[in-house]
Amino acid sequence: MRKLEQKPKSPSQVYRGKMIRVAVAGANGKMGSLICRDILEQDDMSLVAAMDIKGVGKKIGDLEIRDARGMGEIFDELSPDLYVDFTVADSSVKNIETASEKGINLVVGTTGFSKEQEERIRRAVEGKVSAVISPNFSLGVNVFWRLTKEAASHLKDYDVEIIEAHDRLKKDSPSGTARRTYEIVCEVLGERKPVYGRSGSGERGEGIGIHSIRAGDIVSDHTILFGGDGERLEITHKAQSWEPFSSGVLMSIRWLSKGREKKIYEMEDVLEL
């Protein structure tokens, strides 16, 4: 099992640049706790706050999880350079507004935002801070989206189905990744009605099918299917662990630390796709 404490380094190994001071909310959750542990292992980052409304007092490295309901005061006390949010949509919007008001740059991986919440986030961020907001920080998924866009541009008359699978505890359906996949197809083909699962009888129609599976401990599977007469094309991404998503978050933290225009970016900007 990975140790949470940072390993001692020889003088030649010690990072001598400016440390990036990071605060994380959702620190008691799967992704949030992993991100906290990974930050502790970085030479150029310092985890200054781990926050949640559950697990308060639980140790992550030498830090105790603090109550996220006091986030504003925690920011004032610790002055982080960057705030990472992996919580739930309602809380995340308020957290983003709080961090933006304090001038703290953002990396947000929370999903399930409504259109109204997305607009609130846009108003909170633009012109105030720099933010990378993405439903998925994995390199593989971002290439999956790039391939989806390319395929849709060539298969305009094909039927489109999106299938995603996650563990039994995931709360939002469809996943943020599936929703973004749907949006990418619509950007290429024009607006098409989403059809969430199917029941009853009748012809398929022109909609895009979106199907969610919740079972066991599935990490993250996404497939887009383009079906034509006599053939089909399927593009699939499967994650065996949560590490690729955390790696993308660390990449985004470093990317933002180099100074960016105060606006919202996507992971494809970080990856220069």
Image (cartoon, rainbow, N blue to C red):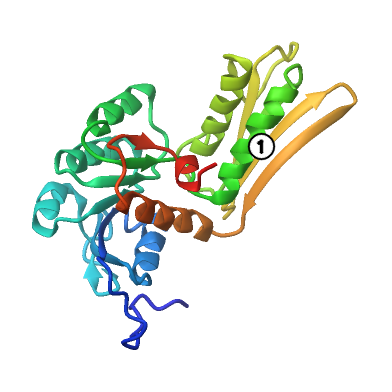
27 to 213, vertically: above or below: below
- At x 58%, y 45%, the residue is 141
Q: For mark 1, give the secondary structure.
A: helix
* Amino acid at dot 1: Leu
Q: Position of residue 245 (x, y in %)?
A: 49, 53
Looking at the picture, tell me which residue is in the foreground, 52 or 7.
Answer: 7
116 left or right of 169 in image? left
- At x 79%, y 26%, the residue is 227
Looking at the picture, tell me which residue is in the foreground, 200 or 273.
Answer: 273
Q: Quadrant location of residue 3?
A: bottom left
92 left or right of 249 in image? left
84 to 196, vertically: above or below: below
Tell me if mark 1 has few (under 14), some (14-19) or many (20+) residues whose alpha carbon lies within 10 angstroms of its own: few
Q: Quadrant location of residue 117?
A: top left
Q: Quadrant location of residue 260?
A: top left
Q: Position of residue 198 (x, y in %)?
A: 66, 22
Residue 162 visible to the viewer: no
Quarter occupied by the C terminus = top right
Q: Position of residue 205 (x, y in %)?
A: 71, 12
Looking at the picture, tell me which residue is in the foreground, 49 or 69.
Answer: 49
- At x 25%, y 65%, the residue is 18
42 to 254, vertically: above or below: below
- At x 56%, y 34%, the residue is 178
160 left or right of 137 in image? right
Residue furthest out toward the right: 230
Q: Position of residue 97 (x, y in %)?
A: 21, 36
Residue 128 visible to the viewer: yes
Q: Which residue is mark 1?
A: 147
